[in-house]
Image (cartoon, rainbow, N blue to C red):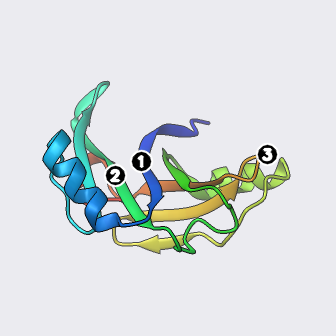
């Protein structure tokens, strides 16, 4: 079973997310919004399939990364999130929440052995994905 298929996003805490977005836009040319930026790409093995990777600065007091105390969270793109969660439960991986489904895909959060929260994302339609994770 294929598990992680790619990097879905990089999320980190910032003292001032708006200023951070502005700095990255000015100095590194990122096109940012209040949600950061999205890097669109096509899959190497099938260029007809689109994908995206998100980059986003969160407020330093966000609860979204809980229960991790780390100032970052990585989002991984996966195939068949339900089956993967079943496998992870068998391996006694801590599943932080229930699978949530949105118009752009399914999400769940798990913890790695050092307590880092990891967001797993199964995009809704990898063949024509125009939305971002989050």
Q: Residue sitting at 29 percent across and 47 percent down? A: 52
Q: From what the image shows, is residue 27 above or below residue 68?
A: above
Q: Residue sitting at 45 percent across and 55 percent down? A: 11
Q: Which residue is mark 3?
A: 113
Residue 93, x across and y down, in percent? 79, 52
Q: Which residue is mark 1?
A: 8
Residue 98, x across and y down, in percent? 65, 72
Q: From what the image shows, is residue 77 above or below residue 109?
A: above
- Sequence-wise first label, 2 or 3: 2
Q: Nearer the viewer, residue 99 or 1?
A: 99
Left or right, residue 90 beside residue 2: right
Tell me if residue 134 can be seen.
no
Left or right, residue 76 beside residue 20: right
Q: Are marks 2 and 3 in contact (CB under 8 Å)?
A: no
Q: Are marks 1 and 2 in contact (CB under 8 Å)?
A: yes
Disc 1 is placed on an element classified as strand
Q: Residue sitting at 54 percent across and 53 percent down? A: 72
Tell me if residue 43 can be seen.
yes
Q: Which residue is mark 2?
A: 54
């Amino acid at each position: 079973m294929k598990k992680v298929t790619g990097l879905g996003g990089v999320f980190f805490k910032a003292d001032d997310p708006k200023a951070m977005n502005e700095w990255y836009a000015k100095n590194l040319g990122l096109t940012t919004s209040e949600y950061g930026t999205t890097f669109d790409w096509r899959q190497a093995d099938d260029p007809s399939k689109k994908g995206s990777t998100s980059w986003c600065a969160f407020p330093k007091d966000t609860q979204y990364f809980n229960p991790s105390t780390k100032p970052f969270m990585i989002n991984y793109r996966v195939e068949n999130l339900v089956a993967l969660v079943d496998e992870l439960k068998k391996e006694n991986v801590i599943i932080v929440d229930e699978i949530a489904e949105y118009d752009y895909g399914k999400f769940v959060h798990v913890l790695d052995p050092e307590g880092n929260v990891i967001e797993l994302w199964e995009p809704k339609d990898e063949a024509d994905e125009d939305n971002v994770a989050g």
